[in-house]
Amino acid sequence: MKQSLSNYQCPDCQADLYYNDLGKVSCRGADECSFDVKDDVIFFEKQENNYNDYSISAAAEVHDNSLDWLLKTHNTTEDEFRQDILHLLKLEAGQKILVTGVGAGNDLPYICEAIGENGEIFAQDIAEPMLLAAVDRSQNKFKLQKYKINFSLSDAVKLPYKDETFDVVYHFGGINLYSDLKKGIEEMDRVTKNKGRVVFGDEGLADWLANTEIGKMLAVNNPLYSYKPPLSALPETARAVQLNWTINNCYYLISFNSFKAPLDINLDLKHKGKRGGTIRSRFYGVLEGIDPKLKEELYRQAEAQGLSRADFIERLLEGGLKEVKEK
């Protein structure tokens, strides 16, 4: 059964998509972009083979070994780790979820159970071996046939999904190495519904561990532990931002609610008091330097007339400009 294309858009020109007569997916844009479809997986873009450990033929097995070592090293279990993430995702039955960088699909059983058969998952990765492993495991290992899961091979920094499509967007692992980390976070935010939820995480030692002996040992073993949570890359409209840690405080988890409206800040409300002005005028209205004695005299005259400094100076400037224009 073919995937519905109603939630997708061309990642290159953002046009709507359709299935053409050759069984491929094409876009309605001027460039008429075309993408292969194999076993109901849409191939928008993929990483070169053997580019890294995620794009080699045995990528899923390598990932399994690494994850097994990690969990044993930190004396935890995969179930405990995934439950930490589920707690932050706050999933509800019937939701539409995007998992970027789905890897071998280990999160899928947990998400399916949380959103139920009426929910829907869109799973994306740029590494073909990992994504195809997720497709295979969802059917043969995890037995998720009764759930709605849609797979695409694509780039997380230019997602092939329409604006405000998903209730929750989730990513774990590999985000530190994005070609454009800020753009990747912007893309997750873009495709999340207004007031929807974004959760992502990766290696990064908590600050209180970074300079300890154990922290230094961990960072030597894996340099990615030295990465810091990219809070500065969040959209300015993010709300309810939380920074959490998992796996012995060696991996950060950032969560926020995606709001599409700008921050509700009145930049033009006048200050009361001697200085006066507004947030906007104080930022954009800075004038060239004047003689300090003249400035003090201006301040004295403003106070004498019961005006704020900003109002007094604006009146003087308005009068002076009017006089100049009339000459």
Image (tube, helix red, strand yellow):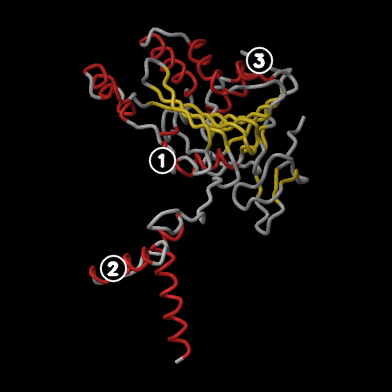
Q: Of label 3 and label 2, which has the lower sequence position?
A: 3
Viewer-side residue, 248 vs 47:
248
Q: Are marks 3 and 1 in contact (CB under 8 Å)?
A: no
Tell me if mark 2 has few (under 14), some (14-19) or many (20+) residues whose alpha carbon lies within 10 angstroms of its own: some
- What residue does disc 2 label? 295
At label 2, the amino acid type is: Lys
Q: Residues within 10 Å of mark 1 (few under 14, many from 20)?
A: few
Residue 185 in the image, given as x and y percentages of width and height: 50, 39
Farthest residue in the left direction? 213
> On the rendered image, what quadrant is the N terminus found in?
top right
* Residue at left offset 42%, top offset 18%: 246
Which quadrant would residue 134 be assigned to in this image? top right
Q: Are marks 3 and 2 in contact (CB under 8 Å)?
A: no
Badge 3 or badge 1: first in the primary sequence: 3
- Tag 3, which secondary structure? helix
Distance CA(mark 1)–CA(mark 2):
38 Å
Q: Position of residue 52 (x, y in %)?
A: 41, 32
* Left or right side of 324 for 237: right
Residue occupying the point 61% across, 37% down: 192
Instruction: Pick the quarter of the image with the C terminus.
Output: bottom left
Q: As shown in the figure, which amino acid type bears the numbered disc 3?
A: Glu
- For the residues labelled 3 and 1, the Cα–Cα distance comes to 33 Å
For disc 3, the marked residue is 113
- Identify the residue at horizontal 64%, vertical 44% (top origin): 163
Q: SS of the residue at dot 1?
A: helix
Figure disc tally: 3
Crowd around label 3: few <14 · some 14–19 · many ≥20 (10 Å): some
The residue that disc 1 covers is: 232
Residue 305 relative to residue 172: left or right? left
The numbered mark, 1 or 2, whose residue comes first in the sequence reads 1
